[in-house]
């Protein structure tokens, strides 16, 4: 049977039962819309968690001493060779930063807290959250700045404020304790209270003098795209042969696992929801076949081959599924556009911070996901039509006459 004639017959058969097919199209459309909207939330959450980890002094890649993770301290520091960054000539790098990051104890007149003392060069920190912080008071002026910047939450816990002095105690390169007083230049307000409680920043050279060591504890790199991580790992591995060069997934495996789960969430939701709808589609097609026994028998008597009958049922199923998916994707885009600029979740800030999500949450609708949903829907439509098509083939002219 010519394809044009096959499409004409299938199209007319669908319009003969407008209500039933319309309900099926609507059900498929709502299911696809729900799946896509849920996927935009999951994609957005995964992206927020990934960006939060990269911003929080981790970067896409970090170079550290092999024993630093087990025993963080200046004793696990290293001195990068001059010009090491030339190895990244073929890698699109957004920036890099060398830091000294050691555990310390910070003391005010009233309270004491355990923190991470981080010596930085503010000019390099455009790659981290430190480069876009809102600071009450003054930010660090450079690597030689002898003042400190503490989190607003930590300042509240220590019952101190801008301009006051704090004492920091940590362990030097020789293993002996070092203690020094610093004036608070400013307090920063981060997206997460956990960051405000943990990180205390000062100039990198100030920390080097305190620890009596020119070493750094980490080199953090931010790339233009996460797709370039394998290339950057290979290039840096050749330069820092005696050090660990780790991607953010290795440094934060828990977050990496959550991002991976979110990536597969679309397929899980899709197959659960669309799997249920497939049974409805099969039922509708079987009903349509049983109602057209005489018609199919007459077509068989006129010479229509069994494979043409199968093709007609498959085409009808595919048309119904295609219409439902197209409408569903269009509805998903329409519903997504008002929230594409972000959703204000500041009323749930504490919960969002625990999940690593900012107060302004931005859903993400990706074209690749829409293509995947469309293709998978067509595949399911064809599979759903196989059983009704088999029932249609079994209709013989003699059975049709008896009906």
Image (cartoon, helix red, strand yellow):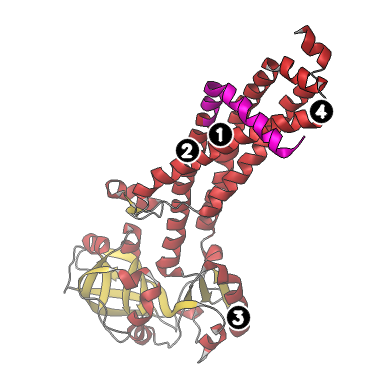
Work out whether 134 lies above or below 204: above
Q: Is residue 174 visible?
A: yes
Question: Which label lies toward us, 4 or 1?
Answer: 4
Badge 4 or badge 3: first in the primary sequence: 3
Helix, strand or loop at label 2? It is helix
Residue 398's x, y, as percent? 83, 12
Badge 1 or badge 2: first in the primary sequence: 2
Q: Report crowding for label 3: few under 14, some 14 to 19, many 20 or more residues within 10 A (C-alpha).
A: some
Magenta segment includes 19: yes
Q: Is residue 261 visible?
A: no
- The residue where tag 1 is placed is 273
Q: Which residues are magenta?
A: 1-25
Q: Are marks 1 and 2 in contact (CB under 8 Å)?
A: yes
Q: Nearer the viewer, residue 309 or 264?
A: 309
Residue ID at (78%, 7%):
402
Residue 289's x, y, as percent? 69, 20
Question: Which label lies toward us, 4 or 3?
Answer: 4
- The residue where tag 4 is placed is 306
- The residue where tag 3 is placed is 235
Is 369 displayed left or right of 385 in the figure? left
Q: Report crowding for label 4: few under 14, some 14 to 19, many 20 or more residues within 10 A (C-alpha).
A: some
């Amino acid at each position: 049977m010519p394809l044009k004639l096959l499409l004409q017959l299938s199209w007319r058969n669908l319009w003969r039962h407008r209500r039933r097919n319309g309900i099926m199209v609507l059900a498929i459309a709502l299911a696809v819309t729900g799946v896509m909207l849920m996927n935009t939330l999951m994609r957005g959450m995964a992206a927020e968690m990934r960006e939060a980890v990269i911003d929080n002094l981790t970067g896409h890649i970090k170079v550290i001493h092999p024993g630093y993770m087990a025993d963080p301290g200046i004793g696990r520091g290293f001195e990068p060779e001059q010009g090491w960054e030339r190895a990244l000539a073929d890698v699109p790098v957004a920036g890099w930063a060398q830091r000294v990051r050691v555990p310390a104890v910070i003391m005010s007149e009233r309270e004491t807290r355990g923190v991470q003392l981080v010596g930085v060069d503010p000019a390099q920190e455009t790659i981290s959250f430190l480069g876009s912080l809102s600071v009450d008071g003054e930010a660090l002026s450079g690597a030689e700045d002898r003042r400190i910047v503490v989190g607003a939450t930590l300042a509240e816990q220590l019952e101190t404020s801008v301009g006051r002095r704090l004492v920091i105690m940590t362990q030097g390169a020789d293993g002996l304790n070092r203690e020094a007083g610093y004036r608070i230049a400013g307090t920063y307000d981060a997206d997460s209270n956990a960051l405000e409680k943990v990180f205390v920043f000062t100039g990198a050279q100030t920390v080097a003098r305190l620890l009596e060591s020119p070493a750094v504890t980490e080199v953090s790199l931010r790339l233009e795209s996460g797709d370039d991580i394998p290339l950057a790992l290979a290039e840096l591995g050749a330069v820092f042969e005696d050090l660990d060069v780790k991607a953010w997934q290795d440094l934060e495996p828990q977050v990496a696992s959550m991002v991976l789960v979110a990536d597969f969430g679309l397929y899980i939701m899709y197959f659960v929801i669309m799997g249920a709808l497939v049974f409805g589609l099969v039922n509708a097609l079987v009903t349509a076949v049983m109602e057209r026994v005489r018609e199919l028998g007459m077509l068989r008597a006129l010479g229509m081959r069994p494979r043409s009958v199968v093709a007609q049922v498959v085409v009808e199923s595919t048309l119904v599924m295609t219409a439902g998916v197209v409408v569903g994707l269009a509805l998903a885009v329409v519903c997504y556009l008002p929230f594409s600029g972000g959703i204000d979740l500041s009323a749930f800030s504490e919960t969002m911070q625990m999940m690593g999500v900012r107060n302004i949450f931005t859903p993400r609708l990706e074209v690749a996901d829409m293509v995947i949903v469309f293709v998978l829907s067509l595949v399911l439509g064809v599979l759903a039509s196989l059983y009704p098509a088999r029932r249609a083939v079994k209709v013989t002219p003699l059975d049709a006459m008896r009906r």
